[in-house]
Amino acid sequence: MSPVTVDAKLLGDPIDRVDGPLKVAGAAPYPSDVSYPGMAHAALVQSTIGAGTIIRIDAAAARSAPGVLTVITYENTPALPDGPMTILGPSPRFPFKDNRIVHYGQHVAMVVAETAEQAVAAARLVKAEYEPTTPVLGITNPDAPLEFDAWGMDSTRGDVEGALASAEVTYDETFTIAPETNNPLGLFATVARWEAGRLVVHESTQWPIMARQTLATVFELAEQDVRVFVPFIGGGFGAGLRFPPHAILTVLAARMLDRPVKVVLTRPQMFTSIGHRPETRQRLRIGVARDGRLLAIDHEATSTIGIEETNLEPVTMPTPNSYDCDNVATHERQVRLNIPNPGAMRGPGTTQGNFAVESALDEVAYRLRCDPIALRLHNYAEVQPGTGLPWSSKALRECYRVGAERFGWADRNPEVRSMRDGDWLIGYGMAGVTFDWYQAPCRARISIRRDGTAYARSAATDLGTGTYTIATQLTAQLLGLDLDRVRFDLGDSDLPLAPQSGGSGLAMSLSGALHQAAGNLLGAFLDAVADDAASPLRGRSPDDVTASGGRLHLVDDPSVGETYTDILDRHGLDELTADGAVDPKAEGAGMMPAGGFAARFVEVRVDEDLGVLRVARVVTAIDAGRILNEKTARSQVLGATVMGIGMSLLEQTEFDPGTGRVANATFGDYLIPVNADVPDLDVVFVGEPDRFSPVGIKGIGEIGIVGVAAAIANAVHHATGRRIRSLPITIEKLL
Amino acid sequence: MTAGHPPDVEVTLRVNGQARPIRLESRVTLLDALREHLGLTGTKKGCDQGACGACTVLLDGESVVSCLVLAAQCDGREVTTVEGLSSDGRLHPVQQAFVRHDGFQCGYCTPGQIMSAVALLRAGRAGSDDEIREFMSGNLCRCGAYPNILAAIRDVAAQGDHVEVVGAGRVPAGGERS
């Protein structure tokens, strides 16, 4: 038994971010802010063809340009081992291992100079001659190689074709979603420094442990001789989950020059170097009874992928879990193209799949002339479909109810084009969300020092998600300390192992590890006083003891106890330290660990004469289990909603159909939402603490983007009578 | 085009109330001068193309995107960066409001947002939510903290204690980060 107790409230105190003062003062060090004496600066040169080979690279002019220290091309790059396999597949293709070009914008040279200006100027002097071939482009290109079920996640239950054939009402439509680019505001940067055979790298990564492992493998070092720092990162949204080639080149340059080297990607390079959300096409076939019972779902998704790369994009993954339906099949296909490899972007796969399923259910509801919420409730998955296991928590029903109330769903006239305000057609739309559970092993360490402060740490990251804050808050609560007595460190690969900030799994993993570390630490204090005649807690079992106000004391009698400092003082100890670990296993738990659930409600306004579409308000009711910090959790959902508005209305990465060049690789051309695009956003948390997580929480980093697109498209249909199955919903689709 | 040998220039920037003489290549932007030459890394580079607002500073009291200004144009001019907003270790009211309202997540666009917010308040453009949203739309936030940024600015505007805390701040000791 652990002596530590968790606050029983559903909503954790909305304390301000503990790293907030640093950030608003401009004092938080991001990788691109790091500087060393004698540091050189690198600039990258990228290919101007989409496929082919490099015949010759003339770098003579660049090498003799002012300040230039070296130019690295495939010709002078030593053979380096491939990076390791990760859960996201093999390491990205290293472009300097040969002379082949597999996409437009592939790195072909790195110029290193005394100053960044000199490096950029000299990079323009590098001339590459190519033998081009015709790039394979276009998601519907019949010549493109196709992969089927690349991750072995395709699933079938029941007899889908039979059920579709006999269903009273059938549905068969195709959905398309444009490729998008993550575009965190922070330009990805690498600063590499070799110190007597040890390597120190400041890297824009969401996964310091994976970065360390990759560098150790590629540069043939022991892992303890590599240290990766990322105390702050200017956003990631999935872009920092793979270890990118430009970072390897920077480390190589630092080794060649024996001095620190820094590279900062340009904004256009952010479109081609660190992944993007792939383009997708989905075909969805549904069979339904007249009474609204779902009889069959067949969900096939096709996503784009680099010509010789891997990317995990599970578009159909949540579909089998979302509704109570006996016959469900999912199929994933990938089309290999000469494009920069896609990668994870917030809610990868799930976000796109939800758009199709939740749009389709709205269409089915219209055909059956029933309310979209009623249709969903009619097919509510009380237990996990297929296995029949109970969910560890599920309050989706409450999400529908509370969300509908706050939004005023009952005021909706279901007839299309029935609501109007002057020139504006008004539409209401909704969508449900089922998000998959994911969690990975994690370690954490906590010390309590003689001055009564605690120091907790784990090699996690805080992308802006609030990791610093929730870990500090949770540690303080578990140890019964005031917040200002606790420090939590992350973003350093020398700290105990932590998983990536990805899959909405970090907070669950880390909180579990901290919970166990805190329990072990209190146990260590009780061990220390087990035979201590001076201690009022002598011989007490952990079950009898808890912590509050900086003291350990009996649960039944808080007056019997003493401070951490008293115990450490008396025993001549500077500190006591304990570790915690989680190695989550869903098997054998007797339940299905649940991710988050949500209901999204949107009001749109459409001016048909002008084709203008505005999102007027969004209400989100969300079940994410216990919320550790209401303020930062709400911000996660607000921010993801904004990204969902971008996906729905604005965002599309334009690949030139002839070359594969990204034609809009700037913030002037690739539009993301600005402040004036975002209306009032209402977020309400419902549900109860999750039974599987030791502290009752579920992930909340991604679910906020899911369902926005379907709710908007459904609202557009309600406003205009037009069913848009293609994102983004740009002006020409409304005229 | 050749790399050329752009002449060095000597300029004295008045940064956060302090004279900072520097010698740099004539093509160096104000943004890079602040970050790479003066060690003031609070001002961020998000696009280097004038499109994202992360590098917003005040130049002679007016907000500018410092990636589109050459340092050589700023000789003798007054530059206020995010490091110059706090005084005597106390955060500027706008900085405090951003913390209180969680007006950021990753924090990267935040210095630029805060400088634009200070400029907005000085210009008396916080009359309505829509006016604030419009004025702040030159500053991108990919984390999507816009509603909280709006709330922070609205809050400061209502308190009315924001106007004259600009241009006299101090440069943090140490300058260069390592």
Image: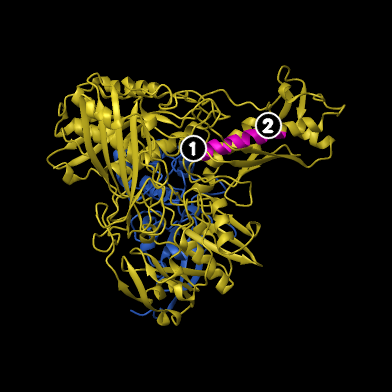
Chain colours: A yellow, B blue
- Find residue A645 and report its horizontal and vertical position in percent: 31, 40
Q: Name the amino acid type tagged 1.
A: Tyr
Left or right relative to A131: residue A393? right
The quarter in which the N terminus of chain A is drawn is top right
Q: Residue furthest right?
A: A533
Residue A715 image position (x, y, % from top left): 23, 32
Magenta-colored span: A504-521
The C terminus of chain A is located in which quarter?
Answer: top left
Residue A438 numbered mark, or none: 1
Chain letter of disc 2 in the image: A
Work out whether disc 2 and disc 1 sit on a shared chain: yes
Q: Earlier in the sequence, mark 2 or mark 1?
A: 1
Q: Is residue A409 visible?
A: yes
Nearer to us in this view, A185 or A92: A92
Establish if A396 lies above or below A143: above
Query: Considering only vertical position in the picture, is A148 above or below A44?
Result: above
Asked if the stretch drawn in magenta spans residue A515, the answer is yes
Location of residue A589 by image quarter? top right
Q: State the residue in front, A347 or A453.
A: A347
- Which residue is the site of mark 2? A519
Q: Chain of mark 1?
A: A
Would you place residue A165 above or below residue A86 in this image? above
Marks 2 and 1, how far apart at CA: 24 Å
Residue at x-position 72% and y-position 28%: A551
Marks 2,1: beta carbons within 8 A: no
Based on the picture, tell me whether residue A241 belongs to the magenta stretch. Answer: no
Q: Nearer the viewer, mark 2 or mark 1?
A: 1
Is disc 2 surrounded by few (<14), some (14 to 19) or many (20+) residues within 10 Å? many
Query: In front here: A202 or A484?
Result: A202
- Residue type at mark 2: give it: Gly
Q: Is residue A384 left or right of residue A507?
A: left
- Residue visible at 43% across and 37% down in the picture: A635
